[in-house]
Image (cartoon, rainbow, N blue to C red):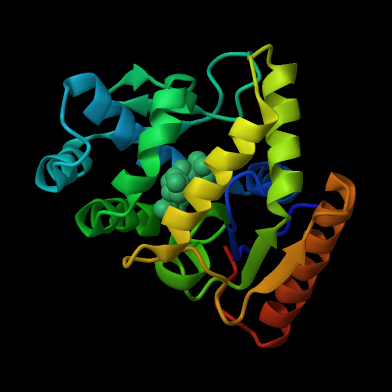
Amino acid sequence: MPATPCKITIAIDGPAASGKSTIGGALAERLGYLYFDTGVMYRAVTLAALEQGVPIEDEAAVTRLAEALLIEVLRPTADDGRQYTVLADGVDITWAIRSDAVNRHVSPVSAYPGVREALTRQQRRIGGAGGVVMVGRDIGTVVLPSAEVKIYLDASPEERARRRHQENLQHGQPSDYAQVLADLQRRDRIDSTRASAPLRAAEDAVCIDSTRMTIGEVVARAEALVREALARVKRDGGDADG
Ligand code: DC
């Protein structure tokens, strides 16, 4: 899809390992848009708490951390398979935020309303100008509710666990399918039942179940939605020219 002068906002939400980063990254590259994975911000706060010895259950202290931590997401600074580089107070944490310890503790951290407030503020600053594919759990519902394209990406828990398990093995990491499935289901449960901005599809989101689809098919479907939105914005004479 050629880059276009008309820049819209694309929100992609969905549960863990539903393919959001693969689809979001591919879409952003084709459009020449910024790709922003909001999950890295919750992971960065979790890592900072673990490293600084702040107890995860101390909501006030974790919230203070979220308010003070400078999180930057840059173009990749190393050729090691990363989609982007993440800095926390200037330190490269791109791979550290993918550790088992962060995986285990990030859902409770992301359930704290004060943490969400601090990070949502930053996400709106980044996404508010358009020309962005923003990926997360609450982008279409809370962060950017007026996004022109909203996609809710899903797949069965077994298929998501299978994909994550394969990914781990490809990266040479030890992986146990049953454990991966149990972890995904635990995170889904916390993310979708928390009081503050729970994981759910926005009413005007298009749901794509990728369980039996290839990556290419999902990207094609997402691109079709983007084309429709761009045509709609142009037709309505919207102010999305950028
Ligand atoms: O997408 P991910 O696995 O990197 O997300 C890590 C955690 O952050 C996950 O438990 C859900 C949470 N998260 C969130 O609550 N809201 C977002 N917009 C993005 C992620």
Query: How many numbered discs sit on the rendered protein?
Result: 0
Identify which residue, 167 or 186, lies in the foreground: 186
The x and y percentages for residue 99 are 46, 22
**At 18% across and 22% down in the image, what residue appears?**
52
The x and y percentages for residue 221 are 83, 62
Task: Answer above or below: position of 33 versus 206.
Answer: above
Task: Answer above or below: position of 80 versus 151.
Answer: above
The x and y percentages for residue 211 are 81, 54
Residue 180 figure quarter = top right
Task: Answer above or below: position of 4 versus 53.
Answer: below
Q: Quadrant of the C terminus?
A: bottom right
**At 26% across and 25% down in the image, what residue appears?**
50
The x and y percentages for residue 174 are 64, 15
Q: Residue furthest bottom?
A: 236
Residue 222 figure quarter = bottom right
Note whether residue 187 is visible. Answer: yes
**At 71% across and 74% down in the image, what residue appears?**
229
Note whether residue 32 is visible. Answer: no
On the rendered structure, is 95 left or right of 66?
right
On the rendered structure, is 82 left or right of 89?
right
Task: Answer above or below: position of 89 versus 183.
Answer: above
